[in-house]
Image: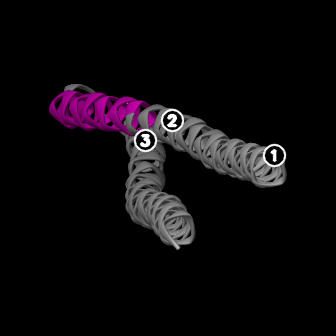
Amino acid sequence: MEQELLKARDEIYKEKESKEEDKSMKQAKILSLSYELDLAKGQLDLRINENQRKDQELLETKQELRKIRTDYAANCEKQRLMDSQFGNATDEADKLRLEMNMMKKLIDSQEQQLVELNDIMEKQEIQNQQKIREMTSQLNDSIAMALTRDRRVKELESIKNQNHLQSTLC
């Protein structure tokens, strides 16, 4: 009888040690998954910061575009004013023609800049949208992977508990 009690006590100690090892392994796995999640969050934060920087650049480009448009409108108005003053004096006609030609060149240059800035803004918008889609996809992949791992850990715990229950019943 004593031997059976000793044997039962040894089995209980072994089972307790096994449970503690399993608990330690699960805690290590949870820590590992938490670390991976923290890394994914850190990468997301970096990408969000980069997108915010790009959004700021886009905002600055839009502001520059507004300024060019304002300058363009001002130059157009100035050209109209010069056209109305053109007939005032024949001596000033040559001067006004020169200024008008310079204004036209400036307007053409500004129109070209406007077209180029519009192209840049469209490209930046496309790139930003693509980056957002990529980051969203990566985040979803990371979340799905973490959820799958968590489900697998729970399944393994359930199987272990069932095996343990069966072994104690036997």
Q: What amino acid does circle 2 point to?
A: Gln
Task: Inspect the image, locate mark 1, and give the three-letter code of the amino acid beneath it.
Answer: Glu
- Most extreme residue toward the front is 1
Is 84 within the magenta?
yes
The local crowd at label 1, few if under 14, some if 14 to 19, many if 20 or more residues have their Cα within 10 Å, is few
Q: State the count of labels.
A: 3
Q: CA distance from mark 1 to mark 3?
A: 125 Å
Residue pushed farthest left?
84
Q: Magenta residues, as a range? A: 63-87
State the CA–CA distance, disc 3 to disc 2.
Answer: 51 Å
The residue located at (21%, 25%) in the rendering is 88
Q: Which residue is mark 2?
A: 52
Horizontal side, residue 141 vs residue 16: left or right: left
> Given this view, does label 3 or label 2 mark the residue nearer the observer?
2
> In front: mark 1 or mark 3?
1
**What numbered label is drawn on residue 54?**
none
Secondary structure mostly seen in magenta is: helix
N-terminal of the pair, mark 1 or mark 3, is 1
Q: Nearer the viewer, residue 167 or 37?
A: 167
Q: Earlier in the sequence, mark 1 or mark 2?
A: 1
Q: Is residue 11 left or right of residue 105?
A: right
Question: Can you tell which mark lies on residue 2?
Answer: 1
Q: CA distance from mark 1 to mark 2?
A: 73 Å
Taking 67 as reference, is 7 left or right? right
Give me the residue at 46% from left, 68% from top. 162
Task: Answer above or below: position of 160 versus 8.
Answer: below
Asked whether residue 91 is in view, the answer is no
Taking the spot 62% from the left edge, 49% from the top edge, the residue there is 40
The residue where tag 3 is placed is 94
